[in-house]
Image: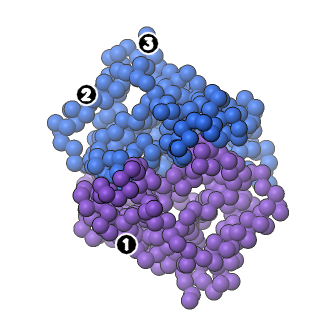
Chain colours: A purple, B blue
Amino acid sequence: MKKKILIVFAHPEQTSLTRTMVNTSIEVLEKMGHEVITSDLYAMKWKAVYDEEDFPVRANSERLSLIHESGNAYATQNQTSDVVKEQEKLLSADAVILQFPLWWYSMPAILKGWIERVYAFGFAYGYKNGTNEFRFGEGILSGKRAIVSVYTGGPESDFSPRGINGPIEQLLFPLTHGALFYPGMEVLPTHVIHSAAFITPEEVEKAKLIWSSRLHNLFTDTPIPFRSQNGGDYPDRHVLRDDIDPEKTGINAHIAS
Amino acid sequence: MKKKILIVFAHPEQTSLTRTMVNTSIEVLEKMGHEVITSDLYAMKWKAVYDEEDFPVRANSERLSLIHESGNAYATQNQTSDVVKEQEKLLSADAVILQFPLWWYSMPAILKGWIERVYAFGFAYGYKNGTNEFRFGEGILSGKRAIVSVYTGGPESDFSPRGINGPIEQLLFPLTHGALFYPGMEVLPTHVIHSAAFITPEEVEKAKLIWSSRLHNLFTDTPIPFRSQNGGDYPDRHVLRDDIDPEKTGINAHIAS
């Protein structure tokens, strides 16, 4: 069945591995019969800084409360047009792909700024009733799929279970769990290409095939089993129920065994 | 003894909790006899996006390799003046304090962009010989202390050991371990104020006292015991030695028990 897929990507250089793999995404998905839409953040000169310019019509012109102004702008249709356009893209998509180089163990600032500005109050958080009631598995982006494809400078061993950098899935937990699963998307395991700066043309071709197979399974692969907030695992104040994996604490406790 | 302390902070609103706590930092540290310098990223209109404009003189005008251009600009003194100024501030400081609101479980884009642009190749990474040999405990910022003070929207329970958000120290590991410890700084445990939007004036006064005591112990508190890369714990390809905490994997393995 034909689906619509949004690719959000962040790299300024056309010949970078990020852009090469974005081109592969478009090619493969279109060949599969899907419709692809893109947000090329560098080409769009995306405004990365979340500030008062995001609120041309202010609810309170004295004091800038970002949550308050965000909620007001969203509710009164006074958001800036670039933000509205990205929200519409998200709403129209069946799946969202994020592709970017890992910079200082997280996403580039321009992509972080895309989340900050597009994820309005009332839209991505404070959904439905202005509280934290509907989030982590239930939100405006419910029913959609998401996958992160990231390109690292360091070798795979640095990101191995006991490698000095920490595992990519834990480093990106604030993104996968905190920004993709939060408004309801099902998040697939992160796709990684290591040692991006040292990759050979042969390895690139191999990497394209591997990524292509991930794309073919975009709607069938099993998502990361993040525990949904309202599924019964967090009966009291968003704290994991005592009898669930009682020995676990931290990030890993929120992924079902 | 008089020390020099750099405060880097990111919030556009003067009356925000972030800015209130920054004012407390300045007041307390100056009263202690220290010299305080600041980087008010919003007031500076800090350029958050890392791109070709960071390299007015290019090593390769055809293809933008950020690592290559960064290394070249740093080595040939062709960095932009805003970046040079921040590097000089870092080098002159005995301690660095980062103060910011937690947005989508990480730092604001403007601060991420500060790291991306200021942390040049040859300066913060590729130190000394262009490899990964000197990092995680050994680097250009060795001997300095760092502390993160962060203000969250969510309540403390959401960040508790089994709270749905995950613990703050794990969410910020990419920053504390990956960006502060990486170039050599000793990082103190993160200071957090929860439920920032709902804080009462009385709680703010109490919060100032708690933060003030953290500031008094800035040079005496025990840092997070991150394992240094060249201290013997990672003898082979930056992977933790088999006999050290053999049951541990992931982020936590890199913090000594």
Pointer 2 residue: B209
Q: Is residue B24 visible?
A: no
Secondary structure, mark 2, is: helix
Is residue A203 shown left or right of residue A27? Answer: right
Pointer 3 residue: B2
Query: Which amino acid does the dot numbered 2 rest on?
Result: Leu
Residue A191 position, x and y percent, is 61, 63
Q: Nearer the viewer, residue A185 or A34?
A: A185
Query: Which amino acid does the dot numbered 3 rest on?
Result: Lys
Q: Quadrant of the N terminus of chain A?
A: bottom right
Residue depicted at 18% across the width and 42% down the height = B200
Q: Which comes sooner in the sequence, label 3 or label 2?
A: 3
**Tags 1 and 2 on a common chain:** no
Pointer 1 residue: A140
- Mark 2, residues whose alpha carbon is within 10 Å: few (<14), some, or many (≥20)? some
Residue depicted at 24% across the width and 68% down the height = A129
Query: Which amino acid does the dot numbered 1 rest on?
Result: Ile
Is residue B20 shown left or right of residue B112? Answer: left
Q: Nearer the viewer, residue A238 or A140?
A: A238
Secondary structure, mark 3, is: loop
Residue B190 position, x and y percent, is 40, 36
Number of numbered tags placed on the structure image: 3
Q: Chain letter for mark 3, please.
A: B
Seen as rendered, the residue at the extreme bottom is A1
- CA gap between label 1 and label 2 equals 40 Å
Q: Is residue A218 visible?
A: yes
Q: In this picture, is A5 found above or below B69?
A: below
Is residue B105 shown left or right of residue B90? Answer: left
